[in-house]
Image: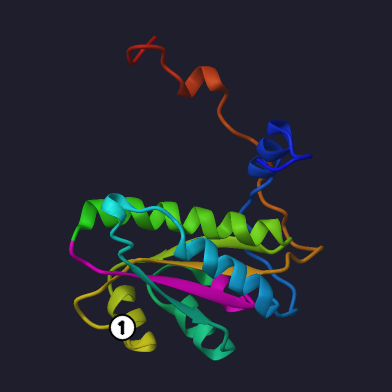
Amino acid sequence: MSEGESAADLISFLLSLRAVREFREDPVPREVVDDVLEVARLSGSASNKQPWELVVVRDRATLGALAEVEGYADHLAGAALGIVPVMAGGREEQEAYDEGRLCERIMLAARAHGVGSSIGWFVGGGVPAVKELLGVPQERRVRSAVSFGYPREDGRGGRGPVRKPISKIVHEERYGR
């Protein structure tokens, strides 16, 4: 924490992250992308393996094609850019954890710049289609993508902060308490 920032300020920032799926046309500046990529580079991973490479996609036609493959990433079509983590493919369980951690961190980095984002994923025939579109080697693992862009003011704004109460998700000492 730096001087002038309180824990309350940082918690408020963390709580401000929302999935944004409707974007303005504005490009995301290079310096913002650089910050996001630096956060990705320094993200932690199991055994510090850093089992990822990142494909940054700005081309609208490619983003549109990615949005069309089998899965849940249609928001890529309207994004200014997308980042597709390409995992090494050797340690499935650890890499799934690392990938989720990585995606959340890059979404927070974008949020720090006022850039919205949403995570999506590919399933079934979408996985080989994404590999084909992006030239990803067969032995690598592709399962998710994060869309980025400035939120549309007239967009849906999300479902809001409706969440389960703490009493429904926290158990003290043993499950069920």
Q: What residue is drawn where x is 57% and y is 78%? A: 77
Q: Give the farthest residue toward the right.
A: 153
Q: Position of residue 78 (x, y in %)?
A: 63, 76
Judging depth in this view, the residue of 83 and 121 nearest the camera is 83
Q: Residues within 10 Å of mark 1 (few under 14, many from 20)?
A: some
Q: Does the magenta run of residues contain 174?
A: no
Q: What residue is drawn where x is 67% and y is 75%? A: 31
* 144 relative to 28 in the view: left or right: left
Q: Give the farthest residue toward the top.
A: 177
Tag 1: amino acid:
Val
Q: Tell how many labels.
A: 1
Q: Which residues make up the magenta segment? A: 75-90
Q: Does the magenta run of residues contain 89?
A: yes
Q: What residue is drawn where x is 31% and y is 83%? A: 136
| Quadrant of the frame with the N terminus | top right
* 108 relative to 71 in the view: left or right: right
* 16 relative to 88 in the view: left or right: right
The residue indicated by pointer 1 is: 136
Q: What residue is drawn where x is 34% and y is 66%? A: 143
* 112 relative to 57 in the view: left or right: right
Q: Give the farthest residue toward the front.
A: 3
Compared to 122, does 91 lie above or below?
Answer: above
Hey, which quadrant is residue 75 in on the image? bottom right
| Quadrant of the frame with the C terminus | top left
Compared to 51, does 84 lie above or below?
Answer: below
Q: Secondary structure at mark 1?
A: loop
Q: Position of residue 5 (x, y in %)?
A: 74, 39
Q: Position of residue 133 (x, y in %)?
A: 38, 87
Q: How is the image coloured?
A: rainbow
